[in-house]
Image (cartoon, grey):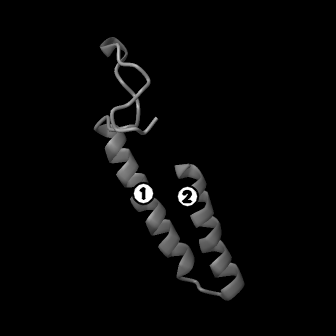
Amino acid sequence: MLCAYLSAGLLVGLGLNALLGWWWADPVTALAIAGVAVKEGRGAWRGESCCTAPISSGASADCDDGCC
């Protein structure tokens, strides 16, 4: 879903730039996408991805936080 949201944001930014001439919409969208990428990257670096348990832990696919 995250990729779909980022793609939709990109299309909106480019569309506002092309249709309405809002030159600033594309860079603002790029900054928002960069912010999301940094946030997701930091979370992945810390191992905070949804429903990924270490193989050796024997955890089931059901998560305590309900993200699965």
Q: How many marks?
A: 2
Relative height, residue 50 to residue 41 (above, below): above
Which element is circle 1 on? helix
Q: Name which residue type carries label 1.
A: Val
Tell me residue 27's x, y (percent).
Answer: 51, 74
Q: Nearer the viewer, residue 39 or 55?
A: 55
Q: Disc 2 to disc 1, how far (Cα)?
A: 9 Å
Q: Nearer the viewer, residue 58 or 2?
A: 58
Tell me residue 2's x, y (percent).
Answer: 52, 51
Q: Which residue is found at the position 35% from the left and 18% from the top?
A: 59
Residue count near mark 1 (Cα–Cα under 10 Å), binned few <14, some 14–19, many ≥20: some
Q: Which residue is found at the position 59% from the left and 73% from the top?
A: 13
Relative height, residue 61 to residue 17 (above, below): above
Residue count near mark 2 (Cα–Cα under 10 Å), binned few <14, some 14–19, many ≥20: some
Q: Quadrant of residue 44?
A: top left
Q: Nearer the viewer, residue 16 or 60?
A: 60
Task: Answer whether labels 2 and 1 touch (C-beta < 8 Å).
Answer: yes
- Left or right of residue 57, residue 12 in this image: right
Q: Which residue is found at the position 56% from the left and 49% from the top?
A: 1
Tell me residue 36's x, y (percent).
Answer: 42, 57
Earlier along the polypeptide chain: callout 2 or callout 1?
2
Relative height, residue 15 to residue 68 (above, below): below
Disc marking residue 63: none
Question: For the view shown, which residue lies furthest in the left direction?
Answer: 46
Disc marking residue 36: 1
Q: Quadrant of residue 20?
A: bottom right
Q: Name which residue type carries label 2.
A: Leu
Q: Which residue is mark 2?
A: 6
Relative height, residue 24 to residue 67 (above, below): below
